[in-house]
Image: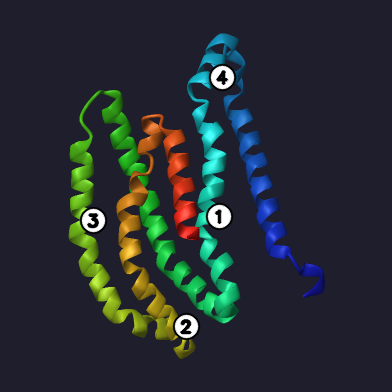
Amino acid sequence: IGFIKGGLIIATVVSAILSFLLNLARSMRKYKCRLASLLPKPDKQTAVTYQNFPKFALPRTLFNYVSANLPFFLLTPFFGLEETGFFGMALTLAFTPISLINGSIYQVLFQQVSEKVNNKQSIIGTFRNFYRRVCLVVPPIGILLFILLPFLTKLLLGEAWNTTADYIRMMLPWLFASLLAGPTCFITDIFMKQKETLYVEFTLLIVRAA
């Protein structure tokens, strides 16, 4: 409505800037003594060693963001806002819990794998256990969800949103793949392969657009 038009965009940008400034202020206050004690030579060496993190992280994040939102950019002109709304709601309902689960597993796996790599131990067993557990637990839940989704969507959103249940049903294999791949995406950072990950993200963007 008039004066609040664009409020979501403004709020998103301002919140990110405020978050950065608050974190920066807290970090400076907490690590001020430690930062002041760093010598120029080791500091420069560290920057050179880990330069791939900032160099490739920004374009990789950009490709990932554009790639993830391609359906909204490309499908809306053909199918209209109503159908895109059903799809967006399906994506929100389906992927939000998946992203939370992925984040939790990511932290545990990252710690375990990092320790083993630093100690020069094999990491195959860790990944084998993770994939075995996901393959045992997730498919039965997916089958149950496939059966219950129309009822759950009707209960949560009402009968007018039945199309959302159809979209979530079609997304189930993708959600399963996300559970397999999402928590392990740190592996390229551990082995300093950020450039390769950037190429993968760019390839995914082209494939999705096609």
Residue 66 numbered tag: 1
Q: CA distance from mark 3 to mark 1?
A: 28 Å
Q: Are marks 2 and 3 in contact (CB under 8 Å)?
A: no
Q: Amino acid at mark 2?
A: Leu
Residue 60, placed above or below residue 122: below
Image location (x, y in percent) of residue 112: 29, 36
Residue 157 numbered tag: 2
Please state which of residues 29 and 210 is positioned toward the viewer in this rendering: 210
Q: Residues within 10 Å of mark 2 (few under 14, many from 20)?
A: few
Residue 34 numbered tag: 4
Q: Are marks 4 and 3 in contact (CB under 8 Å)?
A: no
Q: How many numbered circles are shown?
A: 4
SS under mark 3: helix
Q: CA distance from mark 2 to mark 1?
A: 28 Å
- Camera-near label (4 vs 3) is 3
Location of residue 120 (image quadrant): top left
Residue 134 numbered tag: 3
Q: CA distance from mark 4 to mark 1?
A: 38 Å
Q: Amino acid at mark 3?
A: Val
Q: Are marks 4 and 2 in contact (CB under 8 Å)?
A: no
Q: Of label 4 and label 2, which has the lower sequence position?
A: 4
Q: What residue is drawn where x is 59% and y is 78%? A: 81
